[in-house]
Amino acid sequence: MSDILKSARDRLNENLMEIKQAYVNFVSQNPEMVDQIEKTVKTSSYLFEALSKNYDNSIFISELITSACNLFAYANTKILLKTRNLISQTDENKFVAKLKQVLTVVEFSQAFLELSAGRLGGSGARWAVIVVITIIKTILRCLLLYMFDSGLQSPALVTMINKTSIATQATNSDENENIYIGKRTGHQMATLSSSYSKWESPKPENMNCWNLYPSTLNKREKIGECLHIIRPMLHLLSTGVFGTKSLLPWLAALVVDTSSHALIQRDHKSERPYNPQEKQELRRRYANLIVYLLRSPVYDKTTGPRIHKILHYLSEHLPLAHYVVEPLSKYLPAWQRVYFYTWSD
């Protein structure tokens, strides 16, 4: 009997390995098709959410589909980078790579886990999941910052790599071998043996954006990045002390966020400029300061009523506007509860 079970187990393992290898081959040979499939699935989830009349259920189902799609997209990206020998130089340390993988999975699953906990266990379970996830993210990011000099850290969604660009990059790998990337600054320049003109800088589209070394942060900049990392945890702690309706947690998060920006900022003429990916992350953080207007309790008391008044005015005075404005006004409170929380990125 044991021999039969062992044989069945071995056969199952072989079948699973064959399926895995077939999937890896499909992804590596058809990156554009895989990219289009991912985009189609995401778009269908958004359309379902827009057309559904049950707002809470549609957001839950849409978030389930989006989270699963993001995880598959991340796995597919890893497959492409590995099969095309374009593994990031910053991930040479296997432990660092594992930390980043765990952090990515947590980030992609966060909203869905919060929604699931709220539906199954109520508000208490939802807050428990939020606290646990925030603690995990804070610890992992602090480890990456202080133990492995990870530089400015970007959310996984921001750093996702377009699969078509990976395929293009692989075909241009010979050209990229002649590009030198500074280990400390991330500055890129053509080598003497490259085919680039002596007076011409390497083109940005030929750069390996996932191969850039993180910029080395000085003590002041590390403090600023640390403030950005621990901001969600500080907000949750102050919310536990003062309550969800108090303005103090919101103010504390805003002050910490703006202080982080001030400490991280580098002069445009600095000899240590941030690399392109880090500059993109800084721009995203600046833009996210506007999102504070959509976060409670400011949204509940000030921004929300004004937005609804504007939407009501547009619905009454613009032809056919109510077909768009009415669903939007009903979705906005649900989106605000799910996506515009202060402990997010």
Image (tube, grey):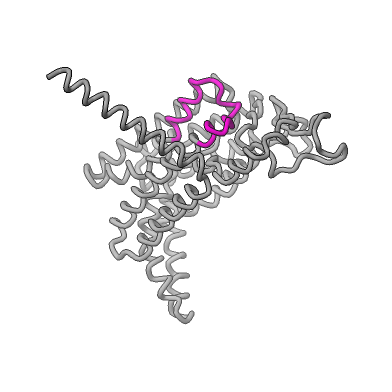
Measured as percent of width and height from the top left, residue 269 is found at 79, 37
Q: In front: 289, or 252?
A: 289
Measured as percent of width and height from the top left, residue 100 is found at 48, 29
Which residue occupies 46% across, 37% down?
25
Which residue occupies 59% across, 23% down?
149
Q: Is residue 3 left or right of residue 173?
A: left
Q: Is residue 80 left or right of residue 219?
A: left
Q: Residue 172 sits in which quadrant?
A: top right
Residue 151 shows up from this direction = yes
Which residue occupies 31% across, 32% down?
15
Measured as percent of width and height from the top left, residue 61 is found at 31, 52
Specify the segment rendered in magenta: 80-104
Q: Main secondary structure of the magenta part?
A: helix
Q: In front: 262, or 302?
A: 262
Residue 252 shows up from this direction = no
Q: Is residue 10 magenta?
A: no
Q: Residue 196 sits in which quadrant?
A: top right
Which residue occupies 50% across, 51% down?
291
As drawn, the residue found furthest toward the right would be 199
Measured as percent of width and height from the top left, residue 86 is found at 59, 32
Quadrant housing the N terminus: top left
